[in-house]
Amino acid sequence: HAHAIINDQDFGYLGMPHGGQNLINDSLLVSENIKALKSDLPLILFGHSMGALIAQNMVMHIQAGNHYQALILTGTPGIIPSWQSILGKLLIQFEIIRQNKKNRAISPIATLLLNTGFNYDFRYEKKSFAWVTRDPEWLEYFLNDPQAGFVPPNQFWLDLIWLLERVRDAENMTQINNDLPILLLDGAMDPINNKTKQSRKLVKKFRDAEIKNIQHIIYP
């Protein structure tokens, strides 16, 4: 879908004022179209990284709960601490004000955190985005792709935090069909979920919501 983008400033921009909800609605619409076209086949929802977060939000919609026969999440951000979401919102709101209320501007602080924070445990590799993959060939492919490795604009981070907060909300978790089989696959060193600490909290949230069939596999 990146080929539909004309302006580079559109990378990571989900729209205003409800970019996160727009993303959920669009994804649900795609699911509904697939279900209509292939009603005789089971529909399994698969999400990786940001896609995993979107998938989690999708299954919390009551009207969509029975669409799926299984949910697979790889590299999910999991459950972030509440202090991180509060601090993140304050930081991005400060950046928007500092940059003359430009929601589509790119924050140098967010750039630093994305390139340095996630890459910290892989700094010996001396390449940006080394945290994305352990395969050097795929890392070069990623780094040379103009549609990958971009830093999203300010508004994206606010939408991301909104999606993360919805997943942390225990009441939202109760909207998930508790007969839905859920498989989580994680890398032990993935910084996205703080080396699986946050994905383990997500598993606990699922179990607290009385979801019956959960499997969590962690790869070393």
Image (tube, helix red, strand yellow):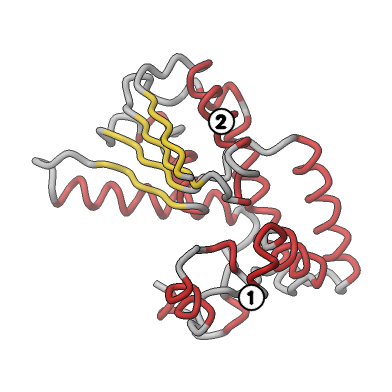
Q: Which residue is mark 1?
A: 127
Asked which quadrant contains residue 8, the reply is bottom right
Q: Secondary structure at mark 1?
A: loop
Q: CA distance from mark 1 to mark 2?
A: 29 Å
Q: Secondary structure at mark 2?
A: helix
| Amino acid bearing label 1 | Lys
The foreground one among 70 and 163 is 70
User: Is 160 placed above or below 185 here?
Assistant: below
| Amino acid bearing label 2 | Arg
Crowding around mark 1 (Cα neighbors within 10 Å: few <14, some 14 to 19, many 20+) is some
Q: Quadrant of the N terminus?
A: bottom left
Residue 189: x and y, percent?
A: 58, 49
Report the mark closest to the observer, 1 or 2: 1
User: Is 130 placed above or below 84 here?
Assistant: below
Q: Which residue is mark 2?
A: 200
Check contact, mark 1 vs mark 2: CB within 8 A: no
Q: Is residue 87 left or right of residue 20?
A: right
Asked which quadrant contains residue 195, the reply is top right
Q: Is residue 117 left or right of residue 46?
A: right
User: Is 145 placed above or below 49 here?
Assistant: below
Q: Is residue 148 left or right of residue 73?
A: right
Asked which quadrant contains residue 104, the reply is bottom right
Residue 115: x and y, percent?
A: 70, 68
Residue 188: x and y, percent?
A: 54, 44
Q: Give me the residue at 58% from left, 76% from top.
A: 10
